[in-house]
Image (tube, rainbow, N blue to C red):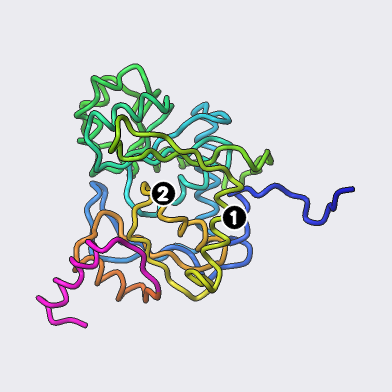
């Protein structure tokens, strides 16, 4: 005999659906970026309902690009709104979100892209030079590259790859998406190690493991996330999924403050101050930079 109460697989798409329906005061506060990816100095707030509609449009766009269940879709990006949308759209349709660490050596990034057999690569404009430097090595692999910006900048990658602009993909797409239901053990995310012993090793996260991990870190004994809290994940989204903070904040309706590429002391201070951050997560070297800025500026 089996119990049928709440008999539904644990899927990542359900987190954003829940947040959009019940957590209108939460969302993302992010440092605004200009078309070329540079920070403008302003902060933008995007509530969960709007994030859900944009993610739905992205899911439609991915489907039209021919992305299928199990396909690996790479991201080479910072902690920002578009990367957040990719997290949910890619795994939500049954594909695998493959986050790439831009700080790895070029030959390691080349190996990772080819080993994962990535179909598309979504790249932040500021990180385009990385792909330009390995274009010859990855030619014949990915179908195309999407620049995470309103427009595609001039790049030699256009000679060998189908290049699209992120916002162009979303334009005209439906703001609702019928998220598929599938086995919760389906792969949702792919992260590679830093290759300290031989080539980098890929680790697959399932929908089930992601949901359970998010649930555990949101408990009072861990980060204690809830509506009204503002979480700043300085730990990168390409580093073990920002320690799960992206999913946990969405699950609980907490707000995420996204720093983008600006991880210097003043950049972090300004975002913490503007967003009213209540919880931060990052490695010690980040805090050394912030402490040095505090000492030099005299700010508290």
| Alpha carbon distance from label 1 to label 2 | 15 Å
Q: Nearer the viewer, residue 198 or 146?
A: 198
Category of crowding for the residue at label 1, using alpha-carbon neighbours closer than 10 angstroms: few (below 14), some (14–19), many (at least 20): few
- Tell which residue pokes out farthest to the right in this image: 1
Question: Viewed as shown, does residue 297 lie left or right of 124?
Answer: left
Task: Determine the secondary structure under disc 1.
Answer: helix
* Residue at position x 26%, y 48% in the image: 35
Q: Position of residue 204 (x, y in %)?
A: 49, 38
Category of crowding for the residue at label 2, using alpha-carbon neighbours closer than 10 angstroms: few (below 14), some (14–19), many (at least 20): some
Q: Tell me: residue 126, above or below residue 235.
A: above
List the residue tagged with mark 1.
212
Task: Determine the secondary structure under disc 2.
Answer: helix
Q: Tell me: residue 214, above or below residue 186.
A: below
Q: Tell me: residue 98, above or below residue 140.
A: below
* Residue at position x 68%, y 38% in the image: 182
Query: Earlier along the polypeptide chain: callout 1 or callout 2?
Result: 1
* Residue at position x 34%, y 53% in the image: 236
List the residue tagged with mark 2.
240
Q: Position of residue 244 (x, y in %)?
A: 47, 56
Check contact, mark 1 vs mark 2: CB within 8 A: no
Q: Which residues are magenta?
A: 279-300
Magenta-colored segment: predominant secondary structure:
helix
Query: Is 295 within the magenta?
Result: yes
* Residue at position x 35%, y 40% in the image: 193
Q: Position of residue 71 (x, y in %)?
A: 51, 29
Q: Position of residue 231 (x, y in %)?
A: 42, 68
């Amino acid at each position: 005999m089996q119990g049928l109460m709440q008999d539904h697989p644990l899927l990542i798409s359900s987190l954003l659906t829940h947040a959009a329906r019940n957590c209108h005061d939460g969302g993302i506060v992010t440092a605004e970026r200009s078309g070329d990816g540079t920070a403008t100095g302003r902060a933008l707030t995007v509530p969960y309902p709007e994030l859900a509609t944009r993610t739905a449009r992205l899911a439609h766009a991915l489907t039209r690009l021919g992305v299928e269940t199990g396909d690996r879709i790479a991201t080479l990006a910072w902690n920002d709104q578009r990367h957040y949308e990719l997290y949910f759209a890619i795994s939500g349709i049954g594909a695998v979100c493959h986050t790439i660490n831009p700080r790895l050596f070029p030959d390691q990034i080349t190996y990772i892209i080819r080993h994962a057999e990535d179909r598309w690569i979504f790249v932040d404009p500021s990180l385009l030079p990385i792909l330009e430097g390995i274009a010859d090595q990855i030619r014949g692999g990915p179908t195309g590259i999407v620049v995470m910006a309103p427009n595609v900048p001039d790049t030699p990658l256009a000679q060998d790859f189908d290049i699209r602009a992120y916002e162009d993909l979303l334009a005209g797409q439906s703001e609702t998406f019928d998220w598929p239901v599938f086995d919760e053990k389906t792969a949702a995310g792919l992260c590679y190690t830093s290759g300290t012993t031989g080539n980098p090793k890929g680790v697959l996260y399932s929908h089930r493991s992601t949901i359970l991990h998010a649930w555990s870190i949101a408990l009072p004994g861990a980060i204690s996330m809830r509506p009204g809290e503002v979480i700043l994940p300085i730990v990168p989204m390409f580093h073990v999924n920002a320690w799960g903070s992206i999913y946990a904040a969405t699950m609980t309706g907490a707000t995420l403050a996204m720093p983008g590429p600006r991880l210097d002391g003043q950049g972090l201070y300004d975002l913490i101050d503007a967003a009213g951050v209540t919880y931060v997560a990052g490695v010690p070297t980040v805090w050394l930079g912030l402490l040095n800025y505090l000492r030099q500026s005299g700010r508290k």
